[in-house]
Image (tube, helix red, strand yellow):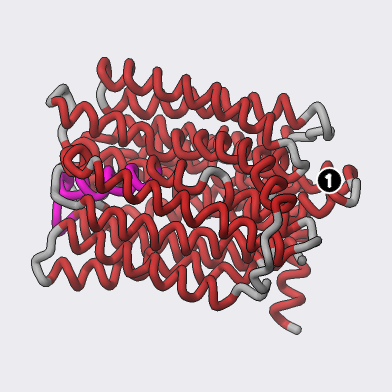
Amino acid sequence: MNLAKSSLKMFVARAFKAAFGFLAVIIFSRKLGASPLGTYYPFLALLGIVGLPADLGIGEATNKRLSEGTKKSSYLGAALVLKTPIVLIVGILVLIFEQYVNQFLGADLALLFVVTLFVKMAGGFSMAVLRGELRVGETAILEVIRPLSWLVVGYLFYLKGYGVRGLIYGYLFGSLLMAIIGWWKVSIPIGRPTIKHAKSILEYAQFSAVSSIGGFFYSWIDVAVMTMFVVVGTGVTRGDVGAYENAWRLALVVMLVGKSIAITLFPQLSRWDAEDATDRIESAIPSALLPSLLLVIPAFVGTLILSEDLLRVLYGPEFTVAWLALIVLAAGKIPQSLHILLSQALNGIDRPDLAAVAAVISAILNLVFNVVLIWQFGLVGAAIATTLAFAVNTLLHAYFLNKFVDIHLPVREAGWSIVASGVMGVCVYTLHSLVAIESIYSLLGVVLVGGVVYGAVVLMYEPIRSEAQRVLRPLVNTATS
């Protein structure tokens, strides 16, 4: 598998995914306002909560075992036998507690929720299988389908007057297409499962399941806790939840590069670990970390200056309540950019147990911090809680991984990025004081000027310029050949 080419495919796909999702959020925010999104986002948060026991780490374990290259059919058969009854049981339990599910969501959505859960699980598992086949680049199209369907189908249902249900129908339709195309692409035949292969999957899954809790807690526990405060009528409204999640999604845009590289890197690290190629793992980590850092650092500086303008111009005035939360969330993307790759590396060398330890510690901190800080400070408290807990998670992953491989962080390159971001920040602040940002065009103009200034300064540093040339050269040669 060509890491550069696969990473590029994933980045392009995720760029389109982010663009379609971003456009959908802008349109639905302006058309519906913050409160309906305060029902849709808890719907997704609850999908994440229920998805944890519905998966139990089997998807990630299947990715790992298939990527090792032996007995693929038997592993796939065993994974399906393990996963199917679990998803059915979870769905039945949701229907049994339908009243409480509807109360959490603020609408009668329990049955639609169960259908969406089943379809989402099927699509997500097909993605895990394809990645385990080292066909990460081929999953790129699947990354685009759901946000595009959410935008197109969701908007059509909105025009028909379905409100927040229209958004859910769009998400469901996209998940269904993802599942159909994903399983159509899978080339491994389903073999006869054996106890040996099922046991092997469960041995890995017991730890990857715990690690996935850490990912969920970072992505959705803040929304879930805020929604619980809404249900009990204490301090937070559904409009606040909608505004906060929009800020979260805006901050998340800069993680495209890091996530693309991490998804591509995991199966390759797994193969290198199976071959005892530790030196290749050590050399891949700093090169993988650098591109993401070069984006998240200037993004934080830009957000520090333009936070309120970003929310007001893109979504509407009622969303500016989350301007300070957006700044904190943007700062949190710096440790997250490190964590995405460090966690994949730790799992790739077959130490999900240590990743699980880090996940449990940070998840407990995240829950406690969110309850206390949301109660005290509302939206900003949620952002601070999530950022602090994930910083701890990143430090723990780095500590554990360093026990097995030497981690060399690109410190000098990151330092130069800080310098370049400072220069960019001065230019953006000056331009912002001279130009009134009242439209998306003026906002894009200021952002573009900042990006050009940052790019020019950061490429003055020869090691960064050389690394950029090294990565881009084979991609350019491939595109022109």
Q: Secondary structure at mark 1?
A: helix
The residue drawn where x is 72% and y is 33% is: 411
Report whether residue 239 is seen. Answer: no
Q: Is residue 357 above or below residue 265?
A: above
Residue at image mark 1 = 283
The kind of residue tagged 1 is Ser
Q: x and y percent of residue 117 in the render?
A: 36, 55
Horizontal side of residue 21 vs 455, given as left or right = left
State which region is magenta. Answer: 30-48
Q: Main secondary structure of the magenta part?
A: helix
With respect to residue 414, does 70 lie above or below? below
Q: Is residue 145 visible?
A: yes
Residue 235 spot, x, y in % from top left? 16, 23
Q: Is residue 113 magenta?
A: no
Q: Nearer the viewer, residue 261 or 393?
A: 393
- Give above or below for 191 relative to 66: below
| Location of residue 247 in the rendering, given as x and y in whole percent from the top left corner | 33, 42
Q: Is residue 330 above or below residue 463?
A: above
What is the quadrant of the N terminus in the image? bottom right
